[in-house]
Amino acid sequence: MNPNAVSVLRQRFPGLVFWFGHRTGVWWAALPVAGGWRLVEAADLEQLTHAVIKAEAWPWPAPRQGARWTLGVGSYA
């Protein structure tokens, strides 16, 4: 993981949360969407950028019907 990559993402998309999952081996972001927050994952930084731009339609991981992820709690309600 390039530590500067997260800094670049945070500058490009202020207020969003980004990280690299050392155990999963993929990039993650917590994004605000209609009605709450959504976790998205991507294989690389280019994909993560697309995920941020198209968060409502991003397929990974698939959001559960009616589920809302609560930032800070880390679980689905």
Image: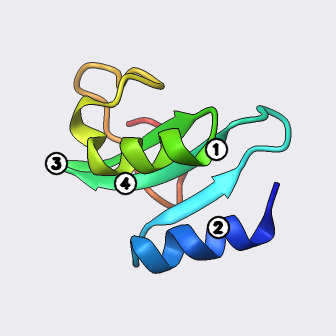
Using the numbered discs, state the Cα–Cα distance from disc 4 to disc 1 in whole angstroms: 13 Å
How packed mark 2 is, by other alpha carbons closer than 10 Å (few <14, some 14-19, many 20 or more), is: some
**In front of the other: label 2 or label 3?**
2
Q: Earlier in the sequence, mark 2 or mark 4?
A: 2
In this rendered view, identify the residue nearer to me: 2 or 37. 2
Q: In this view, does 24 lie to the left or right of 15?
A: right
Q: Which of marks 2 and 1 is nearer the N terminus?
A: 2
Q: In this view, does 43 lie above or below 13?
A: above
Residue under label 2: 6
**Residue depicted at 46% across the width and 25% down the height:** 60
**In front of the other: label 3 or label 1?**
1
Residue under label 1: 27
In this rendered view, identify the residue nearer to me: 7 or 71. 7
Position in image of residue 14 (x %, y %): 40, 78
Amino acid residing under circle 3 = Gly
Position in image of residue 70 (x %, y %): 41, 52
Residue under label 3: 35
Residue 67: quadrant of the picture: top left
How packed mark 4 is, by other alpha carbons closer than 10 Å (few <14, some 14-19, many 20 or more), is: many
Using the numbered discs, state the Cα–Cα distance from disc 3 to disc 1 in whole angstroms: 23 Å
Looking at the rendered structure, the secondary structure element under dot 2 is: helix
Query: Cβ–Cβ below 8 Å for labels 2 and 1?
Result: no
Query: Cβ–Cβ below 8 Å for labels 3 and 4?
Result: no
